[in-house]
Image (cartoon, rainbow, N blue to C red):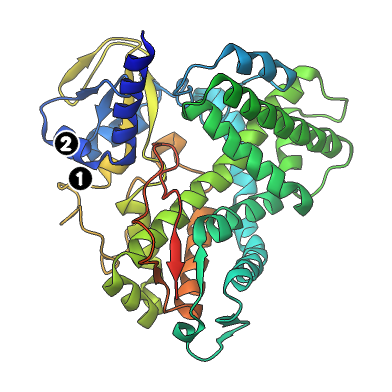
Amino acid sequence: MSAGHEQAEQALRDAFYRDPYARYALARRAEGLTWVPEVDAWLVAREGDVREVLRRAEDFSSANALLPDVPLSEAALGVLPRGFGPRPTVVSSDGAAHLRYRAPLNRGLSSGRIAALMPYAREQARELVDAFAGDAFAGDALVGDALAADGSAELVEAYARRLPGLVIGRLIGLDPADVPSAVHGGYRAEELFFRPLSPPEQAAAAEDVVALQHVLDGYVRDRRAHPREDLCSDLVAALAPGDGELTLEQRHEIVANLQNLLIAGFLTTSALISTALLHLLGDREQWLLLCSDPTLIGAAVEECARFDTAIQGFRRVTTRPVTLGGTKLPAGATVLVAYASANRDERRYAQADRFDIRRPADRRHLAFGHGPHNCPGSRLARAQLHLTLELFSQALPGLRLDPRRPPPSMRPTLIHRSPETLHVTW
């Protein structure tokens, strides 16, 4: 394939990734499933079909859920073996293996654990807001009118990328000093596997991924010797029962699952927070309504998650010949299960394409999946968005998108959909 043809294909893929909703709508109205060449998969777009796939894990395997979107160069492949190799995780496994990986996450992300973590999350959120809006925000109250502060900030970097990393780092048991580098390594992993980079750029990203894996391996070995009340210790105990020295294979498996937990824990929530603020601040009526009526925050959390879903979808592969939505699929067929399309299904939601926080709160949307693979961290993600909306609406009611900047553009990805930047003023 020529370089020009590859660039053209990448441009088409990026356009679809940045705004897939028109294609989703066409696919929901089409007979059967729609083949989407940009993702080399059959698009599962209707809510009923999405739920069916997610319920039938024995027919639609998750083994390909996290396959890279881009081929790795020889330069990157020369670096990655210095780290810890890929192993199945809770996202990419089925049956008994999935239950084994899922069990410690269910315990570690229980409602009790989340409740105990939220005071720390709230404290960190307030410190982050104070760092960029100190003139407008002071402790529990506004200093005069927030509009008078005349400040500005870029919220993706100043807040949305920081809070979830601090929170999941605390839950896992990371030293706060290690959190920034861990977050950096997580974003670099996403870039390496899901964004087109030159061979030197891929090699540099792979170096950062390997560095993250070695940091996590240090925690794994430490928790084997000195268990604590944290999720890292829970994973070690669940995946390698006993107290003997960990084998190299056990370390590979635990590091893979710890890395998956870390990245999912902050990337998904960061995307959820960024996109929620984008839509709320982009609709002045909705934002002022939220500021004037805090009882709407719960409904706003669900509407933000439904309307523009952070995880747009995951791939699945058929394990046998099946018929789905009227389309016959052979064994080995790839489908893209579009949660975000299901959340805009007109058969399920009145005015599904309208963002409206007055919509009655309904947690039955598919933003956090469904069935065996529903997101175990959904409580934590919701809690962080809830405290964010509460804090921002109370402390900075004058917040608005910065009119001096171009409209925010979405990152070209279906894995963690969010604006690339979010410049605001008050």
Say left or right for 118 vs 24.
Answer: right
Label 1: few (<14), some or many (≥20) within 10 Å?
many
Residue at 38% x, 18% y: name it: 317
User: Is the N terminus in the top left, top right, bottom left or bottom right quadrant?
Assistant: top left
Residue placed at 82% from the left, 29% from the top? Answer: 242
Give amino acid for label 1. Asp
Q: Position of residue 82 (x, y in %)?
A: 74, 19
Q: Secondary structure at mark 2?
A: helix
* Point 62% across, 73% down: residue: 130
Looking at the rendered structure, the kind of residue marked 2 is: Arg
Residue 293 x/y as whole percent: 36, 80
At x 68%, y 32%, the residue is 208
Mark 2 burial class by Cα count in 10 Å: few <14, some 14-19, many 20+: many
217 or 194, nearer to the observer? 194
- Choose top left, top right, bottom left or bottom right for residue 134: bottom right
**Residue position marked by numbered label 1 in the rendering:** 345
Label 2–label 1 contact, CB within 8 A: yes
Residue tagged 2:
28
Q: Quadrant of the C terminus?
A: bottom left
Q: Nearer the viewer, residue 147 or 369?
A: 147
Q: CA distance from mark 2 to mark 1?
A: 7 Å
Q: Is residue 385 left or right of residue 89?
A: left
Residue 55, picture quadrant: top left
Q: Secondary structure at mark 1?
A: loop
Q: Position of residue 355 (x, y in %)?
A: 26, 60
Visible in this render: residue 203? yes
Q: Nearer the viewer, residue 79 or 270?
A: 79
Q: In the displayed structure, does residue 33 sit left or right of residue 277?
A: left
